[in-house]
Image (spheres, rainbow, N blue to C red):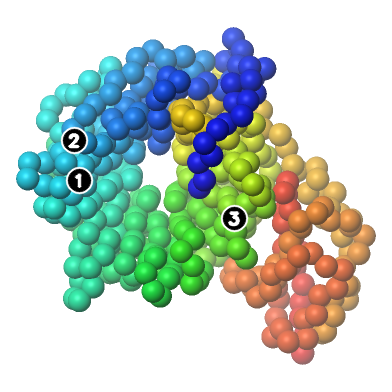
Amino acid sequence: MRFPLFLFGLLASLSPVIAQDCENKITLLGGDFDLMEINRVIRTPDNHFILAGQKNADAVVMKLDGCGNVIWEKSHTYGTEQSFRDIILNGTQFIAIGYCTDCRANDTGRKILIQELSATGDKTGASKLLGPTNLDADAYRIRAVSGDRYVVAGTRTITQGNVSGNAMFAYLLDNALNTQTLQFFGLKTLHEVAYDVVEIPGTGFVFAGKSSQTTAPVTSQMRLVGTNNSLLEIWSQEFFPVSSATEQAARAIGRLPDGDLVIAGSKLEGSQTQLFVGKVNHLNGALKSQATYGGSGDDFARDLQVISQQEILIGGLRSESGFTENPWGLLVNSSLALTHTYPIPNQGLFNSVVAFTDNGKQHYAFAGTAIGFPARGIFARTTALPSDTEAVREADARLQLYPNPVRDVLYLSGWEWPAGTRMSLLTLDGRTVLDSAAMSTLDLGRIPAGSYLLQFRWENGQFARQITVTD
C-alpha cells in the first residue's frame, strides 16, 4: 500500500459528510500531528464501540459513543514501539493483543503482547510477553473458544532443519491467559503469517494467512492450516502460488451457518492484486468457489464478518491507478456475488468491520486509517449500503450464450458489458481454467469436456452462467 505525502482536500471532503446524525458519519481520530492506525473495532453491550490500534509508537485503545465521539482514550507503552492488533470483550473488561519491541529485559526482538484492560482501558495487571529471546514474534488475532480458553494466531521466528524463517503459529491459553499449548505449523517458505483463526466446533481450528518469501525464488501464496483441538496440524492448503513479492494472503476467515468457511484477502491477477473472497470446505480446506473485486490498482480485504448465510460483510481497500486508495466496505452473498458496496471519498483503508442490529434495523461500522500527512484513525458507520443487485440482474437477463452445450466456439451477445469487465471459466470446484477481458467469442476447443461456470466480474457486480463443453 502506498502512503502519499499529502492528502489533498481530506478535511474538505469530510465536511459535508460529518453531521450530528449518527448514521452516515465519518470521524477522524488523533491530532493533526499524530500517526494513528485502528486495527480492530468491536461493539459493546452499552451500544458503544471499542477501538484498538497504534498511536505514534504507542498501543492505543479508545471508546466511542454511538455517533463516533471519543468517550475516553488510553495509550500504553512497553518498549520502543507497540501496537494493539486485536481486542475482545471479557466480561466487563477487555483482552488486547499485539506486539512490542525492546520490551523485555536484554531482548531486542519483537514480542507478543497480551494485556488485560479495565472497562475504562487501564491496565489490570502485568502484561504477558511471549516469544523466543532476541527473535521476533507477533500476534494478529485472539478468539475466545470452547473449554473456557483462548486461541491466538500469529507469526514467530523459528529454525526448521537448515531453514530459518517466520512460521505460522498458534497459542492456546487458559482463562488466566497462561499458555496451555504452543504449536508451529510446517514451514513452507521463509515468511509465513497466521492472520486469523476460526473454531470448528467439535473438530478443531482453521488458520488463515500467507506463505511467501522475497528472496530467490520469490514466491507468494495464500495458506490455510487445519488443526485438531490441541493445535496438531491435520491438513494444509496453499492457493495460487506465483513468483511474485506481491502479497497474496487470506487475511480473515469466518464460518457460515451451513458449515462452509469463507476467507477474504488479496489475490494477484495480472500485475495487480484484487480483493479476494472464497469459500472452502472446513474439513480439508479445499476451495469450493471464489470471486475477486477491485479497480485498476492494488486492492485487498482486511476483515470480514459473517452476518448470515446470505450476508458476508468485508472491509478493505479499493484503489485506482495513481494515488487513489479508498476505504471499501462490501456485502457479498453465499454465492460470493457482490450485492452492496460502501466506498467513501477519503484515502485510506478499513482494517475492521462490525455489523449489528439496533431497533430492528441492520447497521454497519468500519474502522481503519485515513492515509495522509499525517495518517489519522478513521471510524465510519452507516445503515445504508448502495445496492448493486439490479445491475447484476439486468446483465444476467440480457446476456445470451450459444451454443450451449458447446464444442468449439462460444458466442456472447445481448449485453454491453462495462469497461474493465473480466470473464473466467471455472470448474465446479472453483479452479480457474481461463481468465481474460470480456470478449464476444470464447474458443473452448482445447478445454476438456465437462460442466463449467463462466463468471463475469466488473466494478459493481458479478454473475455466472453454467455451460457444458462436449467432446
Of badges 2 and 3, nearer the viewer stands 2
- Residue positioned most to the top: 20
> What amino acid type should be assigned to the residue bearing mark 2?
Gly
For marks 3 and 1 on the same chain, the one whose residue lies earlier in the sequence:
1
Residue sitting at x 76%, y 77%: 468
For disc 3, the marked residue is: 274
Residue sitting at x 33%, y 18%: 73
For disc 1, the marked residue is: 111
- Residue positioned most to the front: 5
Q: Where on the picture, by quarter, is residue 34? A: top left
For disc 2, the marked residue is: 79
Q: Describe residue 105's horizontal placement relative to residue 291 as left or right.
A: left
For marks 2 and 3 on the same chain, the one whose residue lies earlier in the sequence:
2
For marks 2 and 1 on the same chain, the one whose residue lies earlier in the sequence:
2
Q: CA distance from mark 2 to mark 3?
A: 36 Å
Number of disc labels: 3
> What amino acid type should be assigned to the residue bearing mark 3?
Gln
- Image coords of residue 72 (percent x, y): 35, 14
Labelled pair 3, 1 in contact (Cβ < 8 Å): no
